[in-house]
Amino acid sequence: MIKALIKTMRLRQWTKNAFILAALVFDRQISLTNTTPLIRSLGAFFLFCLLSSSVYLINDIIDVEADRKHPTKKNRPIASGKLPIPVAVAAAIVIIIIALPLSYLLSPMLGVIALAYLLLNLAYSNWLKHIPLVDVIVLAMGFVLRVGAGVVVINVERFSPWLYVVTTLFALYIGFGKRRAELTLVANGSGTRKVLDGYNVPLLDQLITIVSSSTILTYSLYTFSAVNLPTNHTMMLTIPFVMYGIFRYLYLIQVKQEGGAPEEMLLTDRPLQITIALWGLAVLAIFYIQ
């Protein structure tokens, strides 16, 4: 039962909460002499991991009947009966009772953002995920809240608002890409998500084109206009990594017919992993070495 509970908590999805660390990195507060910002950011990261796991538990409880009709989701612990619903409910409640007060103690504003994140996801699980376009916008808002959570737990000095825009557009890009992959599964007779009735491939391809090009443009503007970047504009050297990462994801969803689970791609696609690693190393070198 413990193994089933951990599986339902979706530990692999915790990678999404890395956006909380954006303020720490891009405000250039990683320091060997002052570890307080790092510790506080990691604390916020862990608390959001707990909250996101509680959301997955609640979501699987709500979707249990639909999951039992799905070719792969029927194997989820709650849908398959390996994790009893009362146990899942109790676990979700305990996690929330622990995570929300600790978030407020770490920072009152973090407590507010954590509560907003939880309520937004509950609304998504119950209603908003069934509304085309709104469903992806809500997912993007979740990523923006993560970035905001990272900002409020440290004393931010030079964090650029451009990064909120980049985060929003990038999250929309991933979200529409995921919907396209799910729509492909429906065409192959393997999908049950109700909201997909409001989408088609041509619409999603247009939306993906809009948000992917906007993401590249916005990130490029950030690299030479944000106030906290090196004056020699070396941050522009990271643009090719961002472009390749976006192109690679597009290749995976349109050519390889993947993308239904972006977190799985992040953990399995080697070129994507290398690109992200090189981008991260380049950012750290530009901020902290030169």
Image (cartoon, helix red, strand yellow):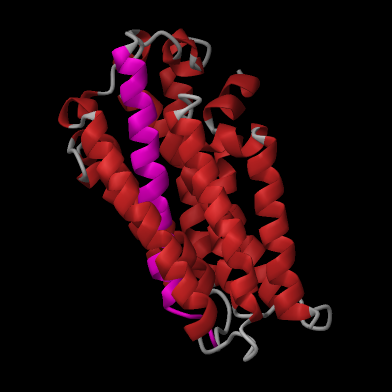
Q: Identify the residue at image location x=33%, y=33%.
A: 179
In the rendered structure, the answer to whether residue 143 lies left or right of residue 26 reads left
Tell me where residue 270 appears, x and y as whole percent. Answer: 70, 37
- Compared to 30, does 7 lie above or below? above
How many dots with numbers?
Answer: 0
Q: Residue at x 28, y 23 (%)?
A: 193
Seen in the picture, residue 9 relative to 72 is either above or below; the reply is below
Q: Is residue 219 highlighted in magenta?
A: no
* Residue 91 seen by the camera: no
Quadrant into which the N terminus falls: top right
Task: Tell which of 60 and 215 is nearer to you.
Answer: 215
Residue at image point 48% right, 85% down: 225
**211 or 146: nearer the eye?**
211
Counting from the top left corner in percent of width and height, residue 192 is at 29, 17
- Point out residue 246 in the picture as x, y percentages from the top left corner: 50, 49
Residue ID at (64%, 71%): 237
Q: From the image, which quarter does the C terminus lie in?
A: bottom right
Provide residue 84's location: percent of width, then percent of height. Answer: 47, 16
What residue occupies the far right of the structure in this picture? 32
Q: Main secondary structure of the magenta part?
A: helix
Report the front residue among 60 and 273.
Answer: 273
Q: Quadrant of residue 239?
A: bottom right
Q: Is residue 229 left or right of residue 75?
A: right
* Rendered view: 165 above or below 77: below
Q: Nearer the viewer, residue 201 or 6?
A: 201
Give, as a single range, the part of the protein colored magenta: 158-187
The quarter of the displayed image where residue 116 is located: bottom left
The answer to if 179 sits in the magenta stretch is yes
For residue 96, above or below residue 190: below
Residue 274 shows in this picture: yes
